[in-house]
Structures are given as structure tokens and as C-alpha cells.
Amino acid sequence: MPTYTCPTCHKDVHVAKPDQLASRPFCTTRCRLIDLGKWLNEEYRISEPLESTSTPPDEPSDSGADLSS
Ligand SMILES: [Zn+2]
């Protein structure tokens, strides 16, 4: 029977059911989401110092006002 340690809560996980392997290497899907959230948070923090001084190109859409009545 496979055993592994959950990276999120560091709990020893004993796989009793094959479908539990779906959330590997985490003990539960919740732990997987927590880890994913941490990951995304770190990504966010890394990209934060890169202050965008220039605004993204915003094309003015008010062109060609064809007023023919
Ligand atoms: Zn866990």
C-alpha cells in the first residue's frame, strides 16, 4: 500500500482507495488547492515589483461615426 507525505499539511497519507491517488501528492483535494493557492500567491508577489508604468494599448473604439439618417 503506497504511503506518502502531504506537502501541505505534512501528514502521512495511507492510500486505502485507488481514487485517493487522484489528489496525490496531497492528502486531499483541499490540500492541493491550498498549495496551488500558495503557488499563485508567490507568482503574484514576484510579478508585483514589475510596475507597469506604461498603460496597455487601448484602442479607441469611437471611430468612424457614420451619422447618416
Ligand atoms: Zn494534507
Image (cartoon, rainbow, N blue to C red):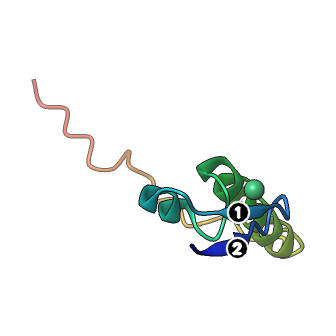
Pointer 2 and pointer 1: residues touching (CB < 8 Å)?
Answer: yes
> Measured along the vertical axis of the image, is residue 52 above or below residue 27?
below
Closer to the camera, 30 or 48? 30
Label 1 secondary element? strand
Percent of width and height locating residue 68 = 12, 31
Query: Which amino acid, by three-letter code, is at mark 2?
Result: Tyr
Lateral position of residue 60 relative to residue 4, left or right? left
- Whether residue 53 can be seen here: no
Q: Is mark 1 within 8 Å of ligand 1?
A: yes
For residue 4, the mark is 2
- Whether residue 34 can be seen here: yes
On the image, numbered disc 1 is attached to which residue? 13
Query: Which amino acid, by three-letter code, is at mark 1?
Result: Val
> Measured along the vertical axis of the image, is residue 12 above or below residue 31?
below
- The answer to which quarter of the image holds residue 6 is bottom right
Q: Residues within 10 Å of mark 1 (few under 14, many from 20)?
A: some
Q: Residue at x 43, y 57 (%)?
A: 19
